[in-house]
Image (cartoon, grey):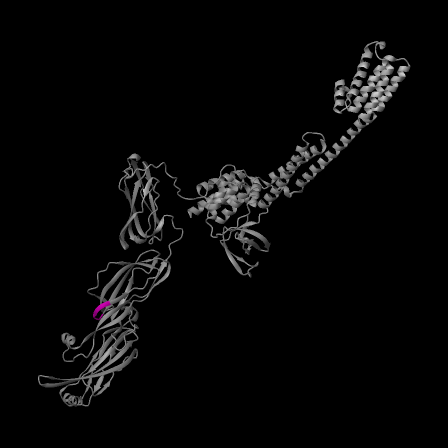
């Protein structure tokens, strides 16, 4: 090895001419890191770097030397190379000159050619080429120029209504050769529903000039985003690994030819992570007061309806199709609410979507209806509200209804096992409160409750007082009545005796006719008082009856009857024929005396 | 704009029309509004009739319906409960109240009342308080009259019968008085209230300082235990108690 170095030092120095080349990009973006590479085919000498513009931030140089020796056709050749790499970031846009660099060896001094570098404005350059600076470079390998490869998510619109589809295109921009794309990783698109559009695989790049720089571009994937929530929704970067074809090793100064270039310098594949810039979409919420027949469709649509036949046989299917046509979120448009008449059995519709998203498409709802009763059924017109983002309001679409007349006899139903169904259960369709009551309402104003008032309770007191008064009066009356009767009873014997005494006086004065009458009066009076019989009601039967009731001896009753008969008889017959009035009088006195003992 | 103008004109016409209308006309006008779908308008008229002191089960029932349709469930429950006090046996009121209750937020395991309390309350509400009061008075008078018969007619054959009848009438009279008192306390001194705020916090003490115990939503029926300032202590259907701000509830 030492020998080889020695040889090269003495041989090559004589044989070779020293050259200094510079390699720098012609156009860079402000803020972008790029390389300026100086290559010298010599190893011993002094390199003087150029004076870079003050707006440039320069790092480096990274210096590397290589030597090689070979025999070609008996000639010994030795090549030694020094490579100096400066990493430069241009600060301001404009055109800058990079002055010559010098290399001084022992024998000669060489200069590099001057270079012009156009620095484009950072913003536009980034918009066109995307941003890849700052992405972590794999350590060790020499970094490729920063904005050579980038990826961008192009959005159709940055401000949309909720549900309004947004077209998105993931596009690749490159200025270097790529050998492949790997690990395309989408973020989770929080708040969106993503629908991929079929995109042909990226095979060849198209050429596109952006800001005077030529890029190879290609669409990686197209898709549609449907915002599901409202507000400022950010989209996280889409990440991907690109495989860069990077030339390593020195460029041969003699064979400056692409073929040899590729041939001699080895090409390695370097993976690099690239990502899109995060984006934000402003999603406006749909206005409140949504129509009842709004089922989430946002876009500009038209509605059509059709039916397979207006006439049908019992139990033969009829198909009604409602088609929503236009641009918008067809996939998310819900089923229209159609109130099919009872008797037409409805099945869940068959839903077919063609196209849609940001392009025009159709969505059809195919209802299978089976008439279960005969008659004419009216399917009401379909009303379907959609939100039109262009007008910014809800639009109600209408499509015609249909009339289906169903014929046939229920008996002809072709069922494998005919079952007798006695009737049909009442179908309850919904629940609601019962209706109000009309009429005069029987309105009354509030009356204060009686029990809360004093006079109500006074009525009770009054009733009680009245009752007590009535009771007292009645008692008093009874007592008084009882006194009158008692007096008469107590004085009955006395009265009778005084009458008999009067009769005796008459007897002595010879008024015989009147004696009997007086005796009768004494007896009747006594009986009436004692037995409490009013004068007008007194009869012999009543008296005897009452006496018997009181268990009076039958002898006494017979005696009483006799005396009474005698007195009556003597009144109408001559005195001589009957008993003497004196005896009668005496008998009556004895009877009264005995009765008085027995009667209380 | 045009729509607002029309509504304003209608409203003004309604106002001027209201001035000269009898309560019955306003009642039927509200019924027409209800039928045509203007539930809030109907509810406003019904509510005004209630505020003016008109009462009838039909009025309260319709008010409840109008509030329900207008989306105010708490007021609907309040008026159904009030209607139920006037007509406890009305099946329509029960049905609608049940539907309105099924749409409120709070669910409780309710402790059922003792069956005889429930029956007694039911009977006391079957007739108005004044009916019971007047009947009780009449029964009392009848009882007194029979008592007089018993006390004075010493030898009458129906003496024993009149005694027992008098006792029976007196008992009936006492029962009717207690029914009247109970009915009055149910209708006029009701301790129940319905929460009208959409959400309200029950605390352990009146004021904002008490610990938060529970959260009630509109439409829940509670029992008022006591009042202190702008707060009421309420008992929930499940038996728990807490202090709730008074403006957030309306007594039945």
In this orientation, which residue lies closer to the viewer: A488 or A2?
A: A488
Q: Is residue B73 left or right of residue A284?
A: right
Q: Is residue B227 left or right of residue A410?
A: right
User: Is residue A108 visible to the viewer in this orientation of the structure?
Assistant: yes
Quadrant for the C terminus of chain A in the image:
top right
Percent across and percent down for residue A339 are: 35, 43
User: Is residue B42 visible to the viewer in this orientation of the structure?
Assistant: no
Q: Is residue A493 left or right of residue B25?
A: right
Q: Is residue A337 left or right of residue B192?
A: left
Q: Is residue A430 magenta?
A: no
Total number of numbered discs in the rendering: 0
In this orientation, which residue lies closer to the viewer: B241 or A527?
A: A527
Q: Is residue A441 above or below residue A364?
A: above
Residues rendered magenta in the picture = A175-181
Q: Residue at x 35, y 53 (%)?
A: A392
Q: Residue at x 76, y 18 (%)?
A: A540
Q: Is residue A485 above or below residue A138?
A: above
Quadrant for the N terminus of chain A in the image:
bottom left
Residue at the limit of the structure toward the right, as seen here:
A509
Name the quadrant containing residue B139: top right
Q: Is residue A438 above or below residue A99?
A: above
Percent across and percent down for residue A307 are: 28, 42
In this orientation, which residue lies closer to the viewer: A124 or B30?
A: B30
Name the quadrant containing residue B159: top right
């Amino acid at each position: 090895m030492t020998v080889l170095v020695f040889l090269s030092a003495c041989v090559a120095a004589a044989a070779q001419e020293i050259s200094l080349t510079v390699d720098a990009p012609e156009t860079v973006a402000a803020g972008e890191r790029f390389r300026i590479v100086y290559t010298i085919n010599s190893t011993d000498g002094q390199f003087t770097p150029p004076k870079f513009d003050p707006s440039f931030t320069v790092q480096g140089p990274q210096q590397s030397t290589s030597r090689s020796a070979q025999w070609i056709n008996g000639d010994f050749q030795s090549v030694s190379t020094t490579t100096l790499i400066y990493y430069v970031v241009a600060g301001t846009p404009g055109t800058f000159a990079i002055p010559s660099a010098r290399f001084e060896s022992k024998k000669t001094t060489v200069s590099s050619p001057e270079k012009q570098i156009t620095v484009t404005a950072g913003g536009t350059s980034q918009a066109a080429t995307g941003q890849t600076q700052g992405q972590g470079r794999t350590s060790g390998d020499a970094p490729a120029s920063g904005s050579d490869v980038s990826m961008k998510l192009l959005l159709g619109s940055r401000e949309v209504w909720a549900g309004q589809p947004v077209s998105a295109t993931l596009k690749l921009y490159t200025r270097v050769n790529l050998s492949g794309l790997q690990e395309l990783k989408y973020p989770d698109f929080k708040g969106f529903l993503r629908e991929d559009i079929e995109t042909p695989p990226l095979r060849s790049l198209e050429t596109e000039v952006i800001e005077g720089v030529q890029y190879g571009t290609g669409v990686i994937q197209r898709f549609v985003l449907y915002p599901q929530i409202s507000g400022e929704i950010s989209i996280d970067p889409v990440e991907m690994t690109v495989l860069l074809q990077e030339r390593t090793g020195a460029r041969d100064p003699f064979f400056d030819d692409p073929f040899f270039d590729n041939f001699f310098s080895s090409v390695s594949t370097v993976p690099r992570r690239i990502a899109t810039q995060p984006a934000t979409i402003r999603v406006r919420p749909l206005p409140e007061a949504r129509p009842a027949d709004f089922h989430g469709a946002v876009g500009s649509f038209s509605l059509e309806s059709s039916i397979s036949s207006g006439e049908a046989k019992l139990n033969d299917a009829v198909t009604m199709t409602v088609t929503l046509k236009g641009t918008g979120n067809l996939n998310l448009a819900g089923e229209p609410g159609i109130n099919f008449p009872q008797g037409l059995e409805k099945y869940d519709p068959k839903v077919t979507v063609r196209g849609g998203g940001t392009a025009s498409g159709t969505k059809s709802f195919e209802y299978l209806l089976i008439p279960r009763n005969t008659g004419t059924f009216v399917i009401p017109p379909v009303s379907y509200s959609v939100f039109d983002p262009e007008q910014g309001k809800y639009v109600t679409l209408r499509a015609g209804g249909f009339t289906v007349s169903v014929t046939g006899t229920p008996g002809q139903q072709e069922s494998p096992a005919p079952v007798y169904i006695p009737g049909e259960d009442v179908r309850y369709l919904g629940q609601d409160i019962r209706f109000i009551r009309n009429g005069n309402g029987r309105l009354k104003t509030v009356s204060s409750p009686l029990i809360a008032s004093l006079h109500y309770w006074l009525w009770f007191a009054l009733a009680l007082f009245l009752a007590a008064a009535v009771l007292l009066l009645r008692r008093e009356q009874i007592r008084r009545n009882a006194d009158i009767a008692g007096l008469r009873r107590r004085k009955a014997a006395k009265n009778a005796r005084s009458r008999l005494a009067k009769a005796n006086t008459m007897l002595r004065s010879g008024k015989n006719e009147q004696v009997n009458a007086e005796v009768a009066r004494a007896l009747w009076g006594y009986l009436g008082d004692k037995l409490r019989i009013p004068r007008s009601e007194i009869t012999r039967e009543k008296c005897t009856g009452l006496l018997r009731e009181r268990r009076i001896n039958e002898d006494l009753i017979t005696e009483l009857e006799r005396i009474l008969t005698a007195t009556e008889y003597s009144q109408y017959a001559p005195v001589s024929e009957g008993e003497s009035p004196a005896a009668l009088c005496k008998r009556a006195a004895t009877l009264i005396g005995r009765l008085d003992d027995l009667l209380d | 704009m045009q729509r607002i103008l029309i509504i304003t004109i209608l409203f003004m016409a309604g106002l001027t029309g209201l001035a000269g209308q009898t309560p019955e006309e306003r009642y039927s006008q509200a019924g027409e509004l209800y039928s045509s779908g203007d539930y809030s308008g109907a509810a406003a008229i019904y509510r005004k009739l209630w505020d003016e002191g008109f009462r009838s089960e039909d009025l309260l029932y319709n008010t409840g319906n109008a509030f329900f349709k207008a989306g105010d469930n708490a007021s609907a429950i309040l008026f159904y409960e009030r209607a139920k006090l006037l007509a406890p046996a009305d099946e329509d009121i029960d049905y609608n109240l049940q539907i309105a209750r099924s749409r409120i937020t709070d669910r409780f395991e309710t402790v059922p009342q003792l069956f005889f309390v429930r029956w007694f309350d039911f009977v006391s509400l079957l007739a108005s308080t004044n009916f019971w009061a007047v009947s009780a008075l009449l029964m009392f008078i009848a009882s007194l009259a029979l008592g007089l018969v018993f006390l004075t007619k010493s030898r009458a054959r129906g003496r024993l019968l009149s005694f027992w009848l008098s006792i029976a009438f007196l008992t009936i009279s006492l029962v009717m008085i207690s029914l009247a008192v109970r009915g009055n306390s149910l209708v006029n001194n009701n301790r129940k209230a319905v929460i009208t705020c959409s959400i309200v916090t029950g605390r352990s003490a009146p004021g904002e300082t008490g610990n938060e115990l529970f959260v009630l939503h509109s439409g829940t029926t509670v029992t008022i235990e006591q009042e202190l300032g702008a707060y009421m202590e309420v008992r929930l259907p499940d038996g728990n108690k807490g202090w709730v701000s008074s403006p957030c509830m309306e007594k039945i």
